[in-house]
Structures are given as C-alpha cells and as structure tokens.
Image (cartoon, helix red, strand yellow):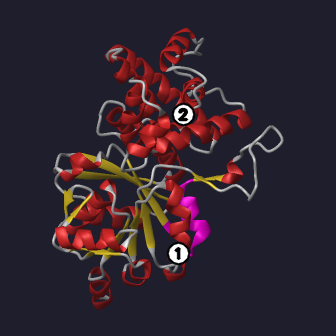
Amino acid sequence: MDSKSTSKNSKPIGVVGAGSFGTAVANILAERNRKILLYARTPQKTDGIQKTRESAGQKVEPNVEATNDLARIGEECDVIFPVVPSANFREMMRRLSPHLKPYHIMIHGTKGFDLNTPEKFTISSRNPLTREYVRTMSEVIQEESSVVRVGCLAGPNLAKEIAEHKPAATVIASQFDEVIKVGQKLLKNDRFLIYGSNDLLGIELCGILKNTIALGAGTIGGMGLGENAKALFISRGLVEMVHIGKTLGGNAQAFLGLAGVGDLIATCASDLSRNYTVGYRLAKGEKLNNIIESMEEVAEGVKTIKIVHELAKTYKVRVPITETLYRISHQEMTVNEAHAYLMKFPFRAEIDFLD
C-alpha cells in the first residue's frame, strides 16, 4: 500500500493550457516539489517556454516542463488540470481521451459553456437553443472520455495577482470528496486557500454567468458612472445570475459564496479581468470585433452573452442585463442607450430567489 501510494505521488501533475491562469496553476502545483507537465498547443510555444522559462508573462518554476504532447499528459499523469478556452475544450478532450482511463482525476478551470449543436443547426423559433446543446466543461469531460472523477476550480482567481503571490482563494467543486481532497492537497498553501463543494453544476454556473455581469460592469467603468452605479449593477447582476442559474439546474446557495459573489466582486472591479476590459473598451467607443481581435486571451463573457440570451428566450426567463448586453454586442443599442434603458427598467423585488 505504501509503495503504491509513493509511486502514485511521484507521478507528474498535468496542466493543459499555458495561458495566464493555466500557468499560474502550474506554478502553484510546482511548489509541492512535484514535476509538472504544462501542455501548450504549438511546438513553438513549448520551445519558447523551455528556453525563456516564461509563460503568459510569468516566470515558470524549475520543475515545470512544457510539452506539446497530449498523449504524454494522459499516460504520465493521474491528475490533470485542463485550463483551455471553452471553444477549444471539446476538441482538446477528443484528442486527449484515447490516453485517459477511469482512474484519472480531472479538475478543470474553464469558465465557459460548450455549444454543441448539430451540423447545419440554425437557432430559431422552430429550433430553439436548449440545455441539450449547452454543456459545462465537466459535462464535456464526461461525454468525451472515460473519466469519472471530475471537478472544477472557481472563484476570484485573477491570474496576475496569483502569479505575484498575493493572497487568494478558490473553490474546488466535485460530486466526489476524493477529488476535492486531492485538489486541496495539491494546491493549498499559505496564500492560496481551497474551499470544497459538492455542487459541481452550481459552482460551474457561477464562474460562467459572472462573465456576463463583469463585461457589463466594465461599461460602467468606461463611462465613469461611479461606484454607486457599479454596486447597483453588480447586485442586480447577481439576481439575474441566480435566476438563469436555477433554470439551468443550479441552486441559489452556490451563488452566495466565493465562486459566486466572490468572483463577481473581483471581476467586476478590476482591469485585470478580461471581461471587464471588453466592457470598458466598448464604453470608450471601440468595436467589439476589434477588441476581441486585439486580445491575447479569450474573454468568455462575449460567447456567454449570446448563449444565455438564447436560453433565456427558450425557457422564458427575463434577463434584462444579458438582453441589453446582447443588443450592444449586435450594435442594436449604444452603451449610453443601454444604461438609460436599464435605469428605467421595472425590476422585480430586490431579492426574490430565497423563497
């Protein structure tokens, strides 16, 4: 038993995705003196990390090895942290899946939806977007592989601050206590606290839905409307998150903790947030396509707005903030018009999701 445990503990830990958060996670894991395999998509990026010992603007710990070989990640690592954009997640899992077994543990850090509609499917009143076509990343992992023990990371985790060794915390959510314990053991240190939750879907939805509100908060920052307006927007945004989250199968409790309110506060108030930055630049008059093209990493909120807008129509959930941001993104409304509209909107009772 001891020899088997020692052998397992000597195996490297895999991180799939060498963006800012993936690199930060790899560095935290490396502090346990374990070998870390950090997967990057291209040989050029892998070679660059190995030569410069930098990734996404961060110094890489000595025991982090960059690799472009997904097969190696699956074959050498029992525990894997996938941190790739939602648009690339399913394709990555299909490539990784042949090298995965039921004994693997996967804890993802991707805060986005997977949209998996049939070929030539066009969203319309006859073909509404339903939950059948929208997946969280844990669901993608389970659909595309034999992995059973799945979890996620969610919380106020701005990668730059984590890389600078500033205090932070996250939630590891999984239906399996073992996954939470493994994640806590590998990631927890004096400046990075790890909470646990068995509400995997609820915690995932927190991380996904707050991206929309963070983008909207960025428009308030860009317009210089002040902290009162931002606080109003964030609190109404939280209510909207809960309503759509409950419709998609989550529960209100998840949104009131670190992965919900905590992440919402961090990303709605910091220019380190990619989604906040998109909203800020929109308010300054830039075009959405130009903003997206100029960004080095994906702002998941742009895609989430479109998906939630369609889901809300299908399930008849009123999401005025998301609806308004959708109209801004499709140039049907200016940012100024949007804020004037929302200030006049007849919102329901302030808190109506705890009954």
Which amino acid type is shown beneath numbered disc 2?
Answer: Val
Between 63 and 51, the one lying in front of the other is 51
Answer few, some or many: residues within 10 Å of disc 2's Cα (few below 14, many 20 plus, some between 14 and 19): many
Task: Indicate yes or no whether the magenta region holds residue 147.
Answer: yes
Q: Position of residue 124 (x, y in %)?
A: 78, 40
Q: What element carries label 1?
A: helix
Residue picked out by circle 1: 95
Q: Where is residue 59 in the image (x, y as percent from the top left)?
A: 17, 61
Between 284 and 2, the one lying in front of the other is 284
Q: Position of residue 238 (x, y in %)?
A: 47, 29
Instruction: Determine whether 353 is above or below 229 in the image.
Output: below
Instruction: Determine whether 81 is above or below 206 in the image.
Output: below
Q: Give the range drawn in magenta.
A: 136-149
- Residue at the image point whose x is 44% and y is 38% from the top: 290
In three-dimensional space, the C-alpha distance between marks 2 and 1, rounded to whole angstroms, equals 34 Å
For the question of whether residue 268 can be seen, the reply is: yes
Residue picked out by circle 2: 242
